[in-house]
Image (cartoon, helix red, strand yellow):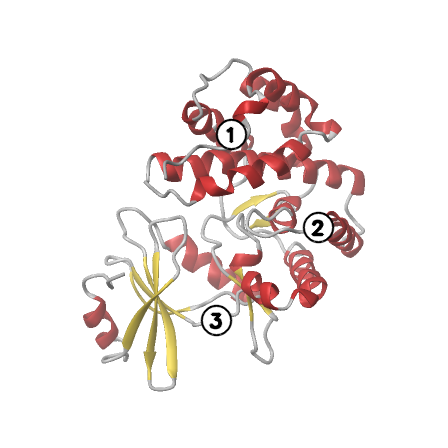
Amino acid sequence: MIPPPGTGAFLNAHGWGGAAVRPLAGDASFRRYFRVTLGTRSAVLMDAPPDKEDSRPFLAIGKHLDTLGFSAPQAMAADLEQGLILLEDFGDARVNPVLAEDPGAEHEIYAAAVDLLAALHQHPPADVPPYSEAEYLREARLFPDWYLPAVGLVEASGHDAAWAPLWPALFTHPPVLVLRDYHADNLMLLDRPGHQRLGLLDFQDALAGHPAYDLASLLQDIRRTVSPELEAAMLARYVAARPELDEAAFRTAYAILAAQRNIKILGVFTRLYVRDGKPAYPLYHPRLWQMVNANLEHPALAPVKAWFDTHVPASARHGVEVPA
């Protein structure tokens, strides 16, 4: 992966001339990341092409989180016209690979992640758009728009109507800042005295919405298995930390949001393959279907389950085939 044009001049202008630049793992967006090292100093260079990515929300939400005392990488320098941002380096200790090496730390780390959410949700949301009914529906429609044609099915009627009775349950609690991709691959273990133990990544798409969304994202993780026992324990931990919530309503919203998110991701991962030529993402489809089939068994999902049972046969619930 070659650094973008202008990297050398950008680094020179901000005191990093002559630094080594090497690639880091990217994500599902058009953003790319590089580690910049100069002597004992290190930073992360984010390349976010301005014609494809608007980095202003990332910077604003990161600043908001930092002001509240949460650890989000802060910008050391930025040139938004080029789409270049130099960020604090949180290291390499992402929670997912850390737990692969040390599974015994799982309960402690997940407890810290749940406690972080409970603390964040005590604050009003930042100046971000609302997680509206229209947005929930737009996301849910990614499934019929992308997944169904990819497995040879035509869109069936009644999709939007099946979801309609569920949306009111997502507006029963005051909105909080929803980071929208809160899971083990976007959490960093930090060794920084005076800071939160967990660092936050990938929050630029944050909205003001229901507090159960990020909890569902954490506990129904696409990329790593969270046992039903751990999910139940962490859900109970969050509820105990926020006794002011209506627990029954919260748990219902959690079930709906877990289903909505996993169904949406079936569509997103199909789009990443069909439109963007990224063949790794359909490999997650079988795991997603396991979670979706379980999600649909919750009584609150009855209308959506009926739609799936009518229009998405079992033979179409394995995923999109990727040619070898």
Callout 3 secondary element: loop
The image shows residue 29, relative to residue 252, as above or below, that is below
Q: Name the residue tied to disc 3.
A: 90
The image shows residue 30, relative to residue 104, as above or below, that is above
Which residue type does callout 1 highlight? Answer: Ala
The image shows residue 63, relative to residue 160, as above or below, that is below
Q: Nearer the viewer, residue 292 or 133?
A: 292
Q: Neighbour class for label 3 at 10 Å: few (<14), some, many (≥20)? A: many
Residue drawn at the location 65% of the way across and 60% of the way down: 113
Which residue type does callout 3 highlight? Answer: Phe
Residue drawn at the location 45% of the way across and 52% of the way down: 204
Q: In which quadrant of the rendered image does the C terminus lie? A: top left
Where residue 315 sits, quadrant-wise, is: top right
The image shows residue 299, relative to residue 255, as above or below, that is above
Residue drawn at the location 23% of the way across and 75% of the way down: 13
Residue 264 on image: x %, y %? 52, 35
Residue 296 on image: x %, y %? 67, 29
Which residue type does callout 2 highlight? Answer: Ser
Q: CA distance from mark 2 to mark 3?
A: 28 Å
Q: Name the residue tied to disc 1.
A: 134
Q: Name the residue tied to disc 2.
A: 227
Q: CA distance from mark 1 to mark 2?
A: 32 Å
